[in-house]
Image (cartoon, rainbow, N blue to C red):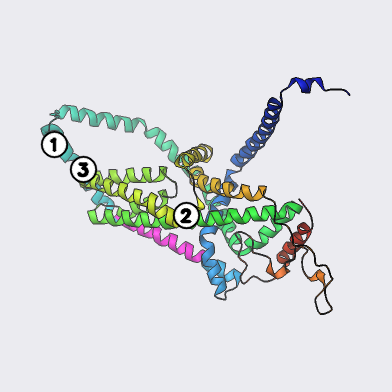
Amino acid sequence: MQIDRPTTLVPPVLAKMAAWCGCLILVGVVVYFFVQAIARLTFVALPVAIALLLTALLFPLTKSLRRAGLRPIYATWLTMLVALAVLAGTGWLVGARASEEFPNLVTQVQATARSVQEWLITGPLHLKQAQITGYVDEIATMVNAQRTAITGTVLSASAVAIEVLASIVLLLFVTFFLLKDGDRIWSWFLRAFGSMSPRVDRAGRAAWTTLSHYVQGTVAVAAVHGLIMGIVLAGMGVPLWAPLAVLIFFASFIPIVGIFFAGTVATLVTLGAKGLVYALIFLGILIVEQQLENHVLQPLIVGRALNFHPLAIILVLSVGGILAGIAGAAVAVPVAAVIYRALPELRHKPPALPPPPEHGPSAGEPPSGDAPAGGRPAEEAPSAPGGPSEGDDVGPAGRSRSGVEGESGGRSE
């Protein structure tokens, strides 16, 4: 009997570590090329990711309209029109308030600047007017030095306006068809996995449930946060309170970092418009409300859909921000939550099928060919994640799904 001498020279632990390292290197190469492909296709990948988030948010309305008796096409169109109306109304409110209150903000900031200048001269610092003028001149010089860079940024931003418009159009198209034909798209997608389709189906449903809970809960929490802060700013008489409330609402979609940025902007506006005392009061209310949101609203509304440690959230946000900027940071957390919930379903084996009956069907029973091999009638097949089933016409997608389950139900994994 020959003994493999190189194998005997390698300890079993080291051999296992080498095997794991080889697998990790292979997975790392695949992930690297996948990320590179996504980076090159950002023009397509980002609108599709945002469309999935919008679909998870808007699907309950479409589902309710279908249950009320509307056909899928009409329910989808009505949902899209309602969403566009809400966006247009919010934009009009923000624009109207900004154009009306901006001159008042400039006046108040000038008055606050004069008060600060008098305090610097007559207060405990006892600065001289020449020193203050020198500081102001230095700031103006820095702004003028950056004018060329600012102008170049504006020009480059105008150059990408067409791409942004095309991305918005693509986003609307993807959202529309996901709301209307999500179940058929999912059935078509499952055909590519053959015997693995039950596991992929379970993983997709778990991912969709997690995404829906996260998006709907985050929108509810952000709406409460923006409403409370808007009421506080309006009660203090701070100009531009409506745009600041909208900014706080959208910034709440980026955990930890977003509210820090929006809170800083709102505090600086309050400081310039109303002075230091009002700014400190607003900052205190913002901190207290943020703590209530983190410890009460998030656990109650979002629940266990996103049970990440703050360190994990910071790391995920950092990776998303490095790869795709602000948009990447916005979608990084839900993507990580979806992957975290879907992977266990891919690893678990499907439940065992019930044993076949000992005797064949009786004379009054329908033949076994009327149902899939998995034992579930075709009309009872569950709807796919992201795709409604109420009110849908029976079409090829429904038959193809039954065929997928029938083929996979009889195979062992």
What is the C-alpha distance between the residues marked 1 and 2?
52 Å
Front one among 375 and 105: 375
Marked residue nearer the N-terminal end (1 or 2): 1
Q: Is residue 155 left or right of residue 408?
A: left
Front one among 202 and 261: 202
Residue picked out by circle 2: 303
- The quadrant in which residue 146 appears is top left
> Taking the image as drawn, is residue 66 in sight?
yes
Front one among 315 and 309: 309
> What residue is at 48 percent from the left and 62 percent from the top?
83
Residue picked out by circle 1: 118
- The quadrant in which residue 20 appears is top right
Q: Is residue 72 above or below residue 413?
A: below
Magenta-tinted stretch? 79-99
What is the C-alpha distance between the residues marked 1 and 3?
14 Å
What is the C-alpha distance between the residues marked 3 and 2?
38 Å
Residue type at mark 3 is Leu
Residue picked out by circle 3: 276
Residue 215 location in percent, x, y? 49, 55
